[in-house]
């Protein structure tokens, strides 16, 4: 028998750059994903540019990790398809989509605001009114159905002009630009939005440096840790300021939650796995929830010869700008070993030792519902603040039958097991208050840029080359989740 608290919030999640499309409409500026090509499970996405001699080119890596040549300018090039430009057109279809979410019974809907719709270049003096109007209308639509918006202030989409002209988040000036943007939206929506998340999967910046096989150089770590520090300060300042705008605001961090296991019972593996929790998971959680760097942080910096620019004022901000709730995404677990890896998992992001007790998705992500219970219990014990699972889902190929139906029982199985795991964690004392599944609706994959890696309970007719009617069709999982919500998590059949 599953058990969820009476006011448990059920819903789904999307991100602006993966869902909205309309990338150059109504005054929106460009963001990093607008210059990022599509990829696949075994070919990376690229960031495109024009070099200083006017020659087009593409560089591996995305976001902070895209390394375009000295003097190059980020650019949209004619020869490539950029899946985020159109995405699934939430920008024009949000009313239809929110109506479908309401039909499923959502009480919460997680979405992000695109910074570049509000401040197209990031450093503009005045906000873009059309951008402010758009999100006001989206939030009003949510409230029409009693759906509480849960807003990510940043979901991988720093305005491109800030990358180009200031070098992105390694530059402290970004703190001021972000806080101004956050202040603008918090004031604008103070009566429409209560729940705010400052940075989506903030820990990715450094965690993926060692997850992709440990190829990060000292320079990468230097930049990565400085980026994180600047984001921590921006987050803390935003929390402090937000509480003066509306004391009822609830702020959360957002961590890419991966459960790390030792691959063997060799004590060296046990320790290596624990150290992975520190560098990958606790590093950010400790600063954002406890208000100070963890005891192990100095060792991490020394290991990579990192020297951070940290001021006394920063430390004060971190201490006084802690978040109220801990939120995270959970898709998989990962095995850590000090031994030679003979059976490695192939797939994007997962890189690690195969766990013989688990099965894997077509993209190499481990299905591990008990790993979610483990994560919830470990994290709650560490921080003792309310938790939200704000992303969890299965990226899979879907088949549309001749009659238009989509039988995604594999997705239902995945969610059923994870909901059961959440209930077990609650029974064990964890204060879990919300679950927003990833992709309530199909959208562009962040990692690969594919449409065919589908997560939604609602199918969107759009392929990897941008062909399709964008028509929405509920999958079997839609009706299943509807029952789950109506029964407050008791009917999982
Ligand atoms: C998280 C992100 O990394 O996982 C989302 O917050 C992302 O933006 C999701 O879409 C699933 O990853 P992917 O690569 O399958 O889209």
Image (cartoon, helix red, strand yellow):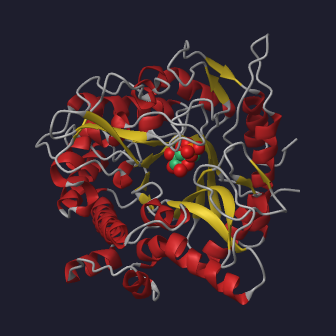
Measuring from the top left, give residue 107's x and y in whole percent: 60, 42
Residue 484: where, in percent of width, then height? Answer: 77, 42
- Count of marks placed on residues: 0
The answer to which of 482 and 199 lies nearer the viewer is 199
Farthest left residue?
125
Tell me where residue 73 sits by quadrant: top left
Q: Residue at x 20, y 53 (%)?
A: 177
Residue 341 placement, left or right of 2: left
Measuring from the top left, give residue 372's x and y in whole percent: 71, 62
Q: Quadrant of the N terminus?
A: bottom right
Q: Quadrant of residue 342?
A: bottom right
Name the foreground residue: 204 vs 354. 354
* Residue at screen point 31% across, 49% down: 186
Which quadrant would the C terminus be assigned to in this image?
top right
Res. 273 visible in picture = yes
Residue 352: image quadrant is bottom right
Residue at position x 41%, y 29% in the image:
82
Q: Is residue 169 above or below residue 137?
A: below
Residue 30 visible in rendering: no
**Percent of width and height locating residue 226:** 30, 69
- Above or below, 149 against 324 in this view is above
């Amino acid at each position: 028998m599953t058990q969820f608290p009476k006011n448990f919030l059920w819903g789904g999640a999307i991100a602006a750059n993966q869902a909205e499309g309309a990338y150059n409409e109504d005054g929106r500026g460009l963001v990093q994903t607008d210059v990022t090509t599509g990829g696949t499970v075994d070919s990376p996405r690229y960031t495109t540019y024009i070099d200083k001699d006017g020659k087009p080119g593409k560089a591996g890596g995305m976001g902070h990790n895209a390394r375009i040549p000295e003097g190059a300018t980020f650019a949209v090039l004619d020869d490539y398809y950029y899946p985020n430009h159109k995405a699934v057109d939430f920008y024009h279809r949000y009313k239809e989509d929110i109506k479908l979410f309401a039909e499923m019974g959502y009480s919460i809907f997680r979405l992000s605001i695109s910074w570049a719709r509000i401040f197209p270049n990031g450093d503009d003096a005045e906000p873009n009114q059309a951008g402010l109007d758009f999100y006001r209308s989206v939030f009003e639509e949510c409230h029409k159905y009693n759906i509480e918006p849960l807003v990510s202030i940043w979901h991988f989409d720093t305005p491109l002009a800030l990358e180009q002209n200031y070098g992105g988040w390694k530059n402290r000036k970004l703190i001021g630009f972000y806080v101004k943007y956050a202040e603008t939206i918090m004031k604008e929506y103070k009566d429409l939005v209560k729940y705010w998340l400052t940075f989506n999967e903030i820990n990715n910046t450094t965690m993926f440096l060692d997850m992709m096989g440990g190829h990060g150089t000292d320079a990468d770590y230097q930049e990565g840790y400085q980026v994180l520090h600047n984001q921590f300060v921006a987050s803390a300042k935003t929390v402090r300021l937000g509480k003066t705008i509306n004391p009822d605001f609830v702020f959360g961090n957002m961590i890419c939650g991966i459960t790390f296991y030792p691959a063997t019972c060799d004590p060296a593996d046990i320790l290596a796995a624990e150290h992975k929790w520190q560098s990958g998971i606790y590093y950010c959680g400790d600063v954002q929830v406890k208000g100070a760097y963890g005891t192990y942080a100095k060792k991490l910096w020394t290991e990579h010869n990192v020297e951070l620019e940290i001021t006394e004022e920063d430390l004060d901000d971190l201490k006084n700008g802690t978040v109220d709730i801990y939120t995270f995404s959970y898709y998989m677990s990962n095995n850590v070993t000090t031994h030679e890896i003979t059976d490695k998992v192939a797939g994007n992001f997962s890189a690690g030792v195969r766990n013989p007790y688990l099965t894997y998705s077509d993209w190499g992500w481990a299905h591990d519902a008990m790993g979610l219970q483990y994560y919830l219990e470990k994290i709650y014990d560490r921080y003792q603040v309310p938790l939200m699972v704000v992303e969890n889902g299965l990226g899979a190929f879907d088949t549309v039958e001749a009659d238009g139906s989509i039988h995604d029982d594999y997705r239902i199985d995945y969610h059923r097991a994870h909901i059961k795991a959440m209930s077990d964690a609650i029974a064990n004392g964890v204060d879990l208050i919300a679950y927003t599944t990833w992709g309530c609706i199909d959208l562009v994959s962040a990692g690969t840029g594919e449409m065919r890696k589908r997560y939604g309970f609602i199918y969107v007719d759009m392929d990897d080359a941008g062909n399709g009617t964008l028509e929405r069709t509920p999958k079997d999982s839609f009706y299943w989740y509807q029952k789950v919500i109506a029964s407050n998590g008791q009917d999982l059949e």
